[in-house]
Image (cartoon, helix red, strand yellow):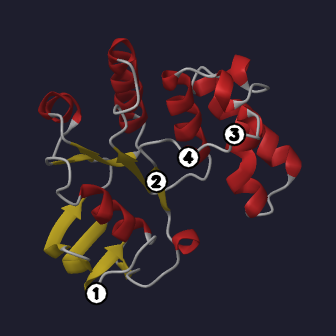
Amino acid sequence: MLRTEKISKQLEAFNLREISLGVSPGDYYVLLGRSGAGKTQLLELLCGLTEPDSGKIFLDGEEVTHKKVQDRSIGLVFQDFALFPHFTVRENISYPLLIRKEEKKEIDRKVEELAEDMNISHLLSRKPMYLSGGEKQRVALARTLVTDPSILLLDEPMASVDASLKDSIRRMLRRINRAGQTIIHVTHDFNEAISLANK
């Protein structure tokens, strides 16, 4: 499904060198490493926010190394969630579909369906400043999943969530994965890695 061949990237004094990996459909693939090891930079290369200096990236057999973010079926949930503060939850989730110019009826259907699935239907009219960390995490996931990505990339998804909420977020991520969503998750937390990963 996703394969990289010796991708390298120089970032000032830091560089990623010849990273090769393979992710199969349905995998929960965890990249474990200390802070500053380059995990986030690797996710940015995979989704197209940055381009490698050398090497290749393949998705479903097609080379996507130099394709734009919007032309890859890859969704990234940022560590800080990156929600639009002036948008409601509904507007945040529907934003990627509005950019794609999907029909309003179809957008409403997808948003309602995902909000129910993520247990955030009661939050649709709220703005992010009135949400807890766990609620923001669910909204950020819903906004990414609404585009139906082939692969979901998670950048330290538990980092901004209270310890008391981590178990429920883990359960939700396992459920999403069991429903068929391929996930690449980066973390520095060994326990988080072994509780979720199949690779």
Q: Quadrant of the N terminus?
A: bottom left
The mark nearer the N terminus, 4 or 1, is: 1
The mark nearer the N terminus, 3 or 2, is: 2
The image position of residue 8, as x and y in percent, is 21, 79
Residue 85 circle label? 3
The image position of residue 51, as x and y in percent, is 38, 80
* SS of the residue under disc 2: strand
Q: Amino acid at mark 3?
A: Pro
* SS of the residue under disc 4: loop
Alpha-carbon neighbours of circle 4 within 10 Å: few (<14), some, or many (≥20)? Answer: few
* SS of the residue under disc 3: loop
The mark nearer the N terminus, 3 or 1, is: 1
139 or 162: nearer the viewer = 162
Q: CA distance from mark 4 to mark 1?
A: 27 Å
Q: Amino acid at mark 1?
A: Asp
Most extreme residue toward the front, as rendered?
13
Q: Amino acid at mark 4?
A: Ala
Q: Amino acid at mark 2?
A: Leu
Q: CA distance from mark 3 to mark 2?
A: 18 Å
Alpha-carbon neighbours of circle 2 within 10 Å: few (<14), some, or many (≥20)? Answer: many
Q: Residue at x 18, y 34 (%)?
A: 189
Residue for badge 4: 82
27 or 39: nearer the viewer = 39
Residue 53 circle label? 1
The mark nearer the N terminus, 1 or 2, is: 1
Q: Residue at x 49, y 55 (%)?
A: 75
Q: Is residue 125 above or below residue 193?
A: above
- Disc nearest the viewer among 4 and 2: 4
Residue 110 circle label? none
